[in-house]
Image (cartoon, rainbow, N blue to C red):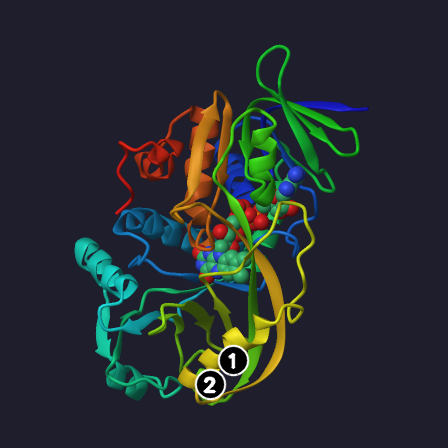
């Protein structure tokens, strides 16, 4: 069987893997081998479903804001370079009951970083966007510079760009089943079909398989794979992109939903961010509608908050790889082996900036200070959590 040796190996050519390869293709002369079990973009990871929200006034913690701002700069740069529309500036509104911690944190992040944010009562929200049914027990913050990323289009764009670069090679259908320390240093990745890839430095960005591959090297990582559902609905003109923003919604009973206006006629799209069904890496996910609550947990929110949304068109399943605190896991647990995972359902918006950060880490062994938030050491008791 063949052995391929390069300077760097990227295992997982999904959101983070392709973003990093794209950065390396344009900023380094090193040889890079990318491996993916499938042929990206595909629906076996966390990057399908057409769209992702990009927010900067971050409800998950203000420490993310510098990374979000850099990411938006890089998305716009990628649009200019590729000539494609990759970001739709719909704005995003974060809605919740008075005092909801997520909505409060959005406002705090905006204040701290001077981001434009309109704070609106429930009545004001419903007057501004008649697609919402809200009263004054709810309120929200609207970020006009936020919007929607075309996730699959972006992956196609990165893939085309790296495939044009002679230093980068992508192997599809390359499912890594084991990583070993190399006999002469570095690392070796073994694929299910017998192919072997060797490199001095490795980025492991293989979603659900990061934990089992690292466990094979004696490193246990606190990552849980969770099945998530989302669906598209008929919606009247109130949900056209000109009339409705992207949103997050914390309900009075503490559930968290997110959604999108009707983009390009695809329909009003909504999913639930919290909860979901844990399942082991590699196990097949039940399809949308196969579990009892799949339709009802979305429908109850449609019925209560979105008066112009009609019939369910279709639903889909996707996966989150969650950490216990839902902050990312990006670290170098063994010398020369960097892991990037645990994006906990909110990582894509940062992929352009993380591609740059991970590229610098692989190529120049320079770990940007923004990544310190995501280290493994935070699970030791003396470390502070991201704020
Ligand atoms: C339903 C849903 C909605 C979301 N909404 C948002 C949002 O609005 N905003 C936002 O910012 N983020 C959102 N996210 C999160 C975001 O999409 C993910 O955080 C991001 O895509 C994760 O990137 P990744 O590179 O870790 O995973 P992926 O993009 O899935 O890439 C991992 C790659 O590794 C490959 N792989 C896996 N195992 C192996 C192996 N053994 N060998 C070789 N290759 C392997 C896979 O085939 C895959 O291509 C959402 C996610 C989901 C599921």
Kind of element beneath mark 1: helix
Q: Is residue 112 visible?
A: yes
In this view, which residue lies farthest toward the top? Answer: 184
Q: Is residue 316 left or right of residue 196?
A: left
Residue on which disc 2 sits: 303
Residue 380: % across, % down: 34, 31
Q: Position of residue 15 (x, y in %)?
A: 54, 48
Q: Residue 185, position in %: x, y? A: 58, 13
C-alpha span from label 2 to label 1: 6 Å
Residue sitting at 26 percent across and 51 percent down?
Answer: 62
280 or 8, nearer to the observer: 280
Residue 129 vertical placement versus 209 (above, below) = below
Instruction: Determine contact: label 2, label 1, CB under 8 Å.
Output: yes
Residue 382 lies left or right of residue 317; in this view the side is: left
* Frontmost residue, 64 versus 135: 135
Can you identify the residue that label 1 sits on? 299
Specify whether 67 is left or right of 86: left
| 293 shown above or below 317 | below
């Amino acid at each position: 069987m063949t052995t391929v040796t390069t300077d760097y190996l990227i295992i997982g050519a999904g959101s983070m893997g392709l973003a990093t390869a794209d950065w390396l293709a344009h900023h380094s002369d090193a040889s890079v081998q990318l491996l993916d079990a499938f042929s990206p973009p595909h629906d076996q990871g966390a990057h399908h479903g057409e769209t992702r929200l990009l927010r900067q006034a971050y409800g998950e913690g203000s420490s993310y804001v510098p990374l979000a701002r850099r990411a938006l700069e890089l998305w716009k740069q990628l649009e200019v370079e590729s000539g494609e529309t990759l970001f739709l500036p719909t704005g995003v509104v974060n809605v919740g009951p008075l005092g909801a911690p997520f909505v409060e944190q959005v406002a705090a992040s905006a204040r701290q970083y001077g981001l434009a944010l309109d704070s609106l009562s429930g009545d004001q929200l419903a007057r501004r966007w008649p697609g919402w049914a809200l009263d004054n027990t709810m309120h929200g913050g609207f970020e006009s510079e936020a919007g929607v990323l075309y996730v699959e289009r972006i992956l196609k764009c990165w893939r085309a760009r790296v495939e044009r670069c002679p230093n980068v090679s992508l192997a599809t259908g390359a499912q890594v089943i084991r990583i070993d320390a190399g006999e002469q240093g570095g690392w070796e990745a073994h694929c299910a079909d017998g192919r072997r890839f060797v490199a001095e430095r490795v980025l492991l960005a293989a979603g659900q398989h990061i934990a089992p591959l690292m466990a094979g090297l004696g490193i246990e990582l606190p990552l849980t794979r969770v099945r998530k559902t989302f669906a598209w609905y008929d919606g009247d003109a109130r949900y056209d992109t000109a009339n409705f923003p992207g949103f997050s919604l914390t309900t009075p009973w503490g559930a968290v939903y997110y959604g999108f206006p009707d983009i390009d006629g695809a329909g009003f799209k909504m999913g639930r961010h919290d909860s979901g069904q844990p399942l082991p890496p590699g196990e097949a996910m039940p399809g949308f509608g196969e579990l009892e609550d799949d339709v009802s947990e979305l429908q109850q929110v449609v019925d209560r908050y979105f008066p112009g949304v009609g019939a369910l068109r279709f639903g889909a399943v996707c996966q989150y790889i969650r950490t216990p605190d839902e902050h990312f896991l990006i670290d170098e647990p063994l010398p020369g082996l960097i892991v990037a995972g645990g994006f906990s359902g909110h990582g894509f918006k940062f992929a352009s900036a993380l591609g740059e950060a991970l590229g610098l880490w692989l190529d120049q062994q320079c770990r940007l200070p923004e990544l310190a938030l995501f280290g493994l050491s935070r699970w030791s008791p003396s470390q502070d959590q991201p704020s």
